[in-house]
Amino acid sequence: MRASLLLEDGTVFHGQGLGIKTDIVGEIVFNTAMSGYEEVISDPSYLGQIVLFTTSYIGNTGITRDDLESHKMFAEGMICKNVSLIPDNHRSKVSLDCYLKEQKKCAIYDIDTRLITHKIREKGCMSAILSTEDHDILSLTNKLNKFQKLAQINAVEIYHQEGPIPKVQYFNQNISKKYKVAVLDFGIKQGILNSLTELNCEPVFFSPSSSIEDIKAIQPDGIFFSNGPGDPSILAKETNIISLMKELLASHPCFGICLGHQLIGLSFGATIEKLRFGHHAINHPVKSLNSDSSKVLITSQNHNYIVNIDNIFNIFEATHIHLNDGTLAGMKHKNLPIYSVQFHPESNPGPRDAEPIFIDFINSMQINRI
């Protein structure tokens, strides 16, 4: 099947297509991970984005449903160099092509992914249209011009419109859960839920529109602010989430990951900056600034926005720094039990160097009970 890709700057690529015949419009981000494409395309944080995989082959492990991070494919589409049409994995349930058809999505391959990656690095994030049915450049250009960019919409609202509450998995049914955690769900990954439940937590889900009364009614031991798609400033502008978070942050131990981390920053007056092309991979080096255990963690990351705490340095201190570009990768409140990181300690996919970071949240809930 023929496929065409038109970038925002007018560059056109023609290649082979997978999935159904359709048009896909989104913001291109490149992911440099060598593995884990199943987790990537099912991560709600990729809503509105077309994922360009820089590794040579995609599809070799097929789709293993137990490894998916949500109930559906949230990435809008895929761009690949080469695709393995027949999976070589005993756990695979369907091929990548079958999964794309099931999800009513498409992909393009057999094109110069290195050139596209260079363009994004030079020009920054850009929108694109991927089509497996329309190959007329003028027509594709008109469709792309009508596209509303991800940075201009409340992507978290779209996430809540498209899916059910994530499934909680208790790995030991015989142990009563010790900590009740109110989860503000902006687009949470299954791996994060698994990490919380493995640490004896009982997650209770709330949307950004939930009331403070509803959250306090469950008497949570702690509050977790999840990852999710889109610009945190848009979510803050169009919802009451910052007012809600300010009240929760003042009264409970809190932990945030990615979008949750950014919203914590906004709640205290930090500024949000958009990276030129984001951090999307499972090999990002992050230095811990803890004087007791200063070390480098190899982390899994997926974000286009970062927090700048220069104007709230008297309230927060940096706990982690990204070694590639020096951006903030983690912070904690100087007086309150509030922690947050800009990477994924649950590591799905990716190395497990940062898993112990969840323990800080668990310890803060334990101390708060005393």
Image: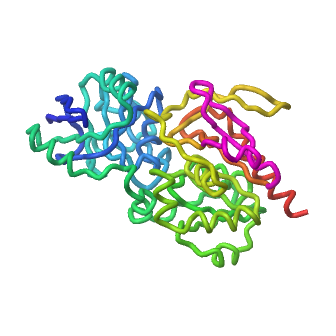
Q: Which residue lies furthest to the front in this view?
A: 311
Q: Tell me the quadrant of the picture where the N terminus can be found.
A: top left
Q: Where is residue 10 in the image (x, y as percent from the top left)?
A: 20, 32
Q: Tell me the quadrant of the picture where the C terminus can be found.
A: bottom right
Residue 85 shows up from this direction: yes
Q: Position of residue 314 (x, y in %)?
A: 77, 46
Q: Where is residue 32 in the image (x, y as percent from the top left)?
A: 45, 27
Magenta-colored stretch includes residue 313: yes
In this rendering, position of residue 126 left or right of residue 210: left
In this rendering, position of residue 88 left or right of residue 296: left
Name the residue located 40 percent from the left edge and 24 percent from the top edge: 55
The image shows residue 299, relative to residue 357, as above or below, that is above
Q: Quadrant of residue 308?
A: top right
Residue span colored magenta: 308-336
Q: Position of residue 258 (x, y in %)?
A: 57, 46
Front-most of residues 187 and 278: 278
Q: In which quarter of the image is residue 59?
A: top left
